[in-house]
Image (tube, coloured by chain):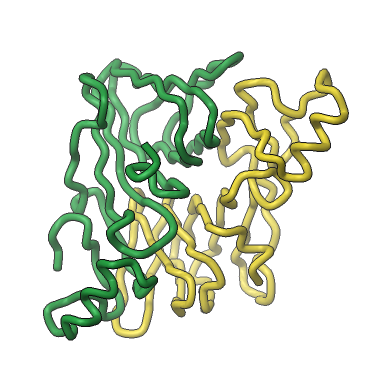
Chain colours: A green, B yellow
Amino acid sequence: MRSSGQGHETAGGAGPFFPKSVKRDIMQGSGEMKVRTYTIEDASFERSPDQDCDVFTANLVDERHGAPVTIGYGRYGPNQSLTEKMAVDDVMIVLEGSLQITSDERTDLVGPGGIVHMPKGEAVTIKAMDEGAVTAYVTYPHWREAR
Amino acid sequence: MRSSGQGHETAGGAGPFFPKSVKRDIMQGSGEMKVRTYTIEDASFERSPDQDCDVFTANLVDERHGAPVTIGYGRYGPNQSLTEKMAVDDVMIVLEGSLQITSDERTDLVGPGGIVHMPKGEAVTIKAMDEGAVTAYVTYPHWREAR
């Protein structure tokens, strides 16, 4: 149960000792989720879809698990950037490095501990600085389903 | 517009040059939100409701602003703890210090960069260690309305 995306379960969950019916409920999204904690070690990064640059996402909780939000870690290579029109409300917390956030009228530089809220429907360019960046993100609803 | 909870607007928003009708729409939750960035400097901490210990929350985005999620910073004094049955899905990212997260069957220690997912309906005890802790949080739906 320490495989990627499963996190450290703090209360039962879909572990090997759980009846299969409960396991199935969790996978089908009945809301049978337990409290869990995650670190970057749990992240299994994939290239962010529809682009070629070094921007990676790793969902930890998403449409497969039954919660209303997607939770994950993001990784940006040095000087990599991504422009997107938001399909969901996306909240990003910068953990390492820094990101330049540009929307219609303004550019902000966000370092560790900074929060970026990108509401659904807004266009935004996210650009990493020389040292790259690591983020945590929460989206509502699930970003992969909304694309 | 740098008052608490307003953040650094990156694109227009409810600034002084915006017509009152637009301002009103934002306050009433029409979804007219723009991309914004926040730092801990934007946080205006209040004691977490229904308890006496030194645990503080600072909503930056909530039911007043039109997004589906509440976003904020949390602060835990040294060795303070809080037990709660979750009224909403709450995702907490530890930014400084560390938190001991206890649910039905398990206790995890979560340090900087760690993520805690507390699904709606679950009971959890959050306890800060000697150095206290600072967190960022995202809840769906709005935690203040769900209490």
Q: Name the residue nearer the viewer: B73 or A64.
A: A64
- Image quadrant of residue B25? top right
Determine whether B42 is above or below A14 in the image: above
Where is the C terminus of chain A found, in terms of image quarters?
A: top left
Determine whether B85 is above or below B116 in the image: below
Can you see residue B72?
no
Q: Position of residue A60 (x, y in %)?
A: 27, 53
> What's the residue at 49%, 36% (across, down)?
A114
Q: Position of residue A110 (x, y in %)?
A: 47, 28
Q: Residue furthest right?
A: B20
> What's the residue at 26%, 54% (across, down)?
A39
Q: Position of residue B17 (x, y in %)?
A: 82, 18
Can you see residue B13?
yes
Horizontal arrangement in the rendering, residue B36 relative to residue B89 (left or right): right
> What's the residue at 28%, 28% (across, down)?
A76
Q: Name the residue nearer the viewer: B37 or A111.
A: B37
Number of numbered markers: 0
Q: Name the residue nearer the viewer: B49 or A5.
A: A5
Horizontal arrangement in the rendering, residue B19 relative to residue A95 (left or right): right
Determine whether A58 is above or below B132 in the image: above
Where is the N terminus of chain A found, in terms of image quarters?
A: bottom left
Q: Position of residue A57 (x, y in %)?
A: 26, 38
Horizontal arrangement in the rendering, residue A142 relative to residue A53 (left or right): right
